[in-house]
Image (tube, grey):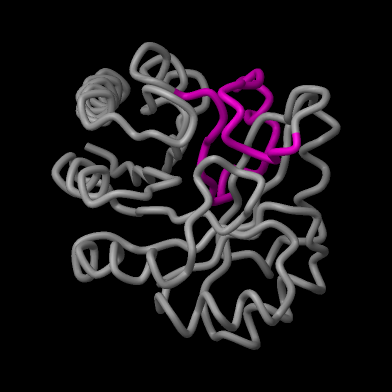
Amino acid sequence: MDTLDIKICGLKTPEAIAAALGGGASHVGFIFFPKSPRHIEPEDAATLREAARGKALAVAVTVDADDGLLDRIVAAMRPDMLQLHGRETAERVAAVKARYDLPVIKALSVREAADLEAIGPYQGIADRFLFDAKPPKGSELPGGNGVSFDWSLLSAIPADTDYFLSGGLNAGNISEALRVAAPRAIDVSSGVESAPGTKDPALIEAFFRAARAGRAHRAA
């Protein structure tokens, strides 16, 4: 059966970390963006990420962060990867990789086929992509809005593009997402929450069950 990386993002509590690890998460994400209900301070994330060390890769998620903030995050929590979820240019991604010697996930927002042309400048620079839905009008959050996009659009990108599928995923739609897009990796945040920023261990468990079922169906 093909492998499927699963990233639970926006973690803030020991209970949520335990649920993510218990379900078999390959990646756990911590968000450093004050406007987000999932925002966490680097020092608090450092404590939580210790539970994941050796079990799942810890990802530090930032939005147009400057070197000062990134320095603080990297020094405090020693992430395994960085995720740049803002308007960072390819040059900025390259500079961040060089400064911290860490792999970088570059998030891109998708609503229509033309949006996927944005991957071009980042090819060969970003280690992985994350395709998220464009935020609803008026939202201050680049991700975690609980909205999805037309997954069939991803059939147009090069087959060797390594990406996380994100945006509005939950236990109810993950099987269909896996069938349509056939991603190697998926990312969920709001889809396993009982309220914005509040991860629900039961919803995390349900998501893993549904993802496993969808993965088995895809393999069959």
Tell whether 155 sits left or right of 21: right
Magenta segment boundaries in residue numbering: 140-169
The stretch drawn in magenta includes residue 132? no
Above or below residue 48? Residue 166 is: above
Residue at image position (65%, 21%) is 149
Residue at image position (45%, 56%) is 30
Where's the C terminus, which quadrant? Answer: top left
- Residue 119: percent from left, percent from top: 75, 50
Above or below residue 73? Residue 110 is: above
State the predominant SS element of the stretch in magenta. Answer: loop
Where's the N terminus, which quadrant? Answer: top left
- Residue 210: percent from left, percent from top: 26, 20
Q: Nearer the viewer, residue 59 or 211?
A: 59
- Residue 204: percent from left, percent from top: 27, 31
Residue 66 quadrant: bottom right
Above or below residue 207? Residue 199 is: below
Residue at image position (40%, 21%) is 170
The stretch drawn in magenta includes residue 158? yes
Residue 65 quadrant: bottom right
